[in-house]
Structure formats: structure tokens, C-alpha cells
Amino acid sequence: MDVKSAFLNGFLQEEVFVEQPKGFVDAHHPNHVYHLKKALYGLKQAPRAWYECLTQFLIDNNYTRGIVDKTLFIKKDNDELFIAQIYVDDIVFGSTNNTKVQQFVDVMSHEFEMSLVGELSYFLGLQIRQLDDGIFITQAKYAKNLVKKFGLENAKHSDTPMSTTLKLSKDASGKSVEQTLYRGMIGSLLYLTASRPDISFSVGVGVCARYQADPKESHLSSVKRIICYVNETSNYEIWYFFDTNASLVGFSDADWAGNCDDRKSTSGGCFFLGNNLVSWFCKKENSISLSTAKAEYIAAGS
């Protein structure tokens, strides 16, 4: 569902004054200003005011706010589970009981002006196909647009994101390349890792993202190879089975001193709920790249 005029619902905690808008200036008091009680579009406080308003409303209706992901709301009633994920004015929600779904729709529609979009099929670049026995999640459309954005749709395809024998380093003697282009490629690929664990290590903290401060031609070549791999595998999907067990299994490994610059290790891990991959990460030193706080969904379900 979508909240209409979301930022106009939040009450302000600070004193905020705004000038009279052009065309609506009071002729008798042209130098007066408005003292706002509620948020307006364009205010820096508007997103926070809206989230606080929505959060308080849901908590008052017995929903629990996520500990890690503050935009996740959970409601448990015996064996029945309801989950709602908030992204600004868009709300994705579902439940093990259809009655809970309708109750949420009624409660939200009574408090806010809502528009119901229907069954989730596309959200923030994620494409979702819901079948009787499971759910497919992909970013095929986003991946194809990414390849086209950087002009590599006709480049030679790659079967793997990186060579197993390649060891990138700072390459101090290498030729520098444009930082804006390199960072744009890394940022675009990082968003793709939301549904593509196969490129998480190559793109993220594991390898290529380390060199954004001073990228060289060798780094750019590696990133282009990843994009060529994405072009070859743009239709890859993650399949989530409905018929699976509730056991939580984790796996972790490290390359042990694999960094050519400082001999630090890079570790990675993934977690399965039954047969379904629900979380993955790549970690170096104290930094971590984790796929959207999915562990909290596991905690809610268990």
C-alpha cells in the first residue's frame, strides 16, 4: 500500500517558521511568517516526523518495532505472524493469516489516506513472482538498465564475476581513472547485491569497493568484468520455498591474509532458514556489508 501525502502527517517537535509563499502573501502583514505545527514537503524534519508519527501509531496498536531494522514492524499472536516493512510512504506487508492482513488494511486506512496497490510484484527495483509453492525474487530489469547505463551491453560476456587467480591491490603505479565513474559503478552494483549474493564479495567490502578513493585502470577493468557477468546472468533469480523446515543454519569462511596491501583477511558468510538463503555478508576488519537486516525477519519467524 501507499500513503498519500505522507510527509503532511507528521507533527513537528521543533519550532519551525516559514515565509509566506509567493502569491499568497497577506497584504496587511507581509512580513509575518507561519509557525508550523505539522511537516511540509521540503522540510529536513519531514521524514523523521512522518516516521515518528507512523511508529507511534503502530506501537499503540500492539505492533513491535524492529531492534536492528527500525522500519520493520512485527505482530505475533500465538502461531500467527504479521510483518510490515516501511519505506518512506510505501508499505509492504503480509501475514500467515489473511484476517490479520485485512485488519491492518482497515486500521491504516482509518488513520491515514491510503491507496492499495495489491499483491506485491515490483518494489524498489525488486521484481517478485508469487507462486503457489514459493516466491521468485530478481532484479533483472534493474540489472539490464545497469549494463546499458555504463554502455557494456555489447561487451564480451563473462562466466564469472572475477578470476579466481586475480589479486587486486592499490596498484600505486597504475593509471588513475575518474572517481565519479568508478563510484557510480560500485554504487549501482552494491544495490544489485540485494538479490545477487554471487557478486557480493567481488563488488563489496571484499574487493572492488576498497579502491574507491583512488581507483586505477586495473580496478576499473575488474568492475567492468563484473558488469559483463551481470549482463550474462541478468535473469538470475532467488527461489524461496514455502515447503521447508524452520532450522537456521549458518556458514562462514575466510581467505586468510588475502589482502595484498595489508595482509588482512576477508571473511564472508550466509544463513539459511531451511532451504532458503535469507542473509549474506562480506566483512573486512571492522566493516561489514549485510543484506538489509534480513536476520530480523528470521528472529520474528522463530
Image: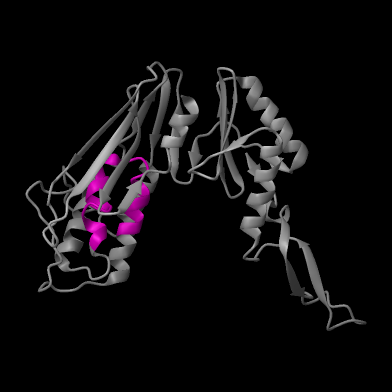
Considering every residue shown, the one lying at the far right of the view is 28
Q: Residue at x 84, y 79 (%)?
A: 32
In-front residue for pair 132/288: 288
Query: Residue 145 location in percent, x, y?
Result: 36, 51
Q: Is residue 98 above or below residue 289?
A: above
Q: Quadrant of residue 242?
A: top left
Q: Which residues are magenta?
A: 186-210
Q: Is residue 245 magenta?
A: no
Considering every residue shown, the one lying at the far left of the view is 165
Q: Can residue 280 be seen from the camera position used here? A: yes
Q: Is residue 155 above or below residue 74?
A: below
Q: Main secondary structure of the magenta part?
A: helix
* 202 relative to 296 in the view: left or right: left
In-front residue for pair 172/134: 172
Q: Is residue 25 above or below residue 147?
A: below
Q: Is residue 68 above or below residue 22?
A: above
Q: Residue at x 74, y 43 (%)?
A: 112
